[in-house]
Amino acid sequence: MTVLCETPRMTRNGRSPVSNHPNRRTFLAGAAAAGTAVTAGAVIAGTPAASAAARYPLPRGAETLRVLVTGDSGTGDRAQYAVTDAARRLHRAHGFDIALGLGDNIYEAGPNGPDDIQFLTKFEKPNAGLDFPWLMTLGNHDNSSVFPGDGGWLLRGDDEVKYHARSRRWYMPARYYSVALGVADFFIVDLHPLAAYIPPILSPEWEAGGHYMTRQSRWLDQALRTSTAPWKFVCTHHPYANNGPHGPAGTYDGLPAPLGGQAAKDFIERHIAGRAQFLLSGHDHSQQVLENVGGLKGTRQIVSGAAAKSVHSASTKRFRARYENYRDTGFMTLDINPNSVALTAFEVPANGAVRQAFSTTYRR
Ligand SMILES: [Fe+2]
């Protein structure tokens, strides 16, 4: 079963049809429009799915799942292709059932409408042959406003929701949603109202504690509480724990409140920690398998945001890492069955020599 939430039905008041960077005035107009025009459960605007080619089907009721995990992928450049080339080789040898895209799907400033050619150049073409559903999470670059990655134009992310109806593989029926696939349930969460570099402080719809986050928290509470799958994965673009340069929630990029993500930290502790086995995130262009993170109540933080870029920095060592890499691009795989989850991290160095760098198995 797929649970849809927050499907957009909104006007684009005040937004330039050509600019990728609306000015402050249009940004605020957009935020105000969001306050009145978002309706949970409304029909997706745009091209009906029925008019597009058949969507790659979700493997509902699966007893096992093989998952490709990528994050921060949408550059369309050689590094992204090197990562997807490696994923294609794995897919030919042992096929994936689904992929997770952990946000920053369209660099640098997100799409200009649901028919933007960037969906072709930064998603469809690089992922050719990886023909299965991609469960997509929104990232800060997908919600850009004044400068790329500021996360301040939340309406821009809705273009990625609308693109769901135009693609066989891009799966994003709403800004936040869940997908039940038998052996595992996936909960895709949108933390941007709590983590944007330009917070929506003037809109009762989007602000922290506003209508949108209230609806999302109620939905997530119920969805996690009623999930009966052996394994539960929550996906957020912004991590809770992070040894990379973006830092952890509460002190993102060393910024003071409210820009440091304290509200995102509180949200994760209140609504996710201890309720799912895994929290999968991107944002930092690195790969990390963290353990025993205080505040997460046993939920394991995995970071995989290196599908097109790497940060080339040292670990802060704030959190205990079983594996971490800040040098190379890469991706992860999950092999899920009712009793175990096998996680493998692949590194794709600049010379293209792919290596399996880390593997571990979690048991129930
Ligand atoms: Fe990001």
Image (cartoon, rainbow, N blue to C red):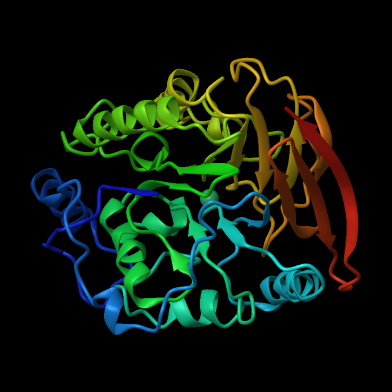
Closest to the observer: 354 or 255? 354
Q: Do we see residue 164 in this rendering? A: yes
Q: Please tell me which residue is depicted at 48% across the width and 68% down the height of the picture.
A: 57
Percent of width and height locating residue 312:
78, 52
Above/below status of 127 relative to 190: below
Above/below status of 50 relative to 30: below
Closest to the observer: 254 or 155? 155
Percent of width and height locating residue 53:
39, 84
Q: Quadrant of residue 15?
A: bottom left
Q: Do we see residue 327 in this rendering? A: no
Q: Please tell me which residue is depicted at 24% across the width and 37% down the height of the picture.
A: 212
Q: Is residue 309 left or right of residue 254?
A: right
Above/below status of 5 relative to 136: above
Closest to the observer: 260 or 236? 236
Q: Is residue 28 left or right of residue 317?
A: left
Q: Quadrant of residue 172?
A: bottom left
Q: Please tell me which residue is depicted at 74% across the width and 47% down the height of the picture.
A: 287
The quadrant the C terminus occupies is top right
Percent of width and height locating residue 328:
81, 58
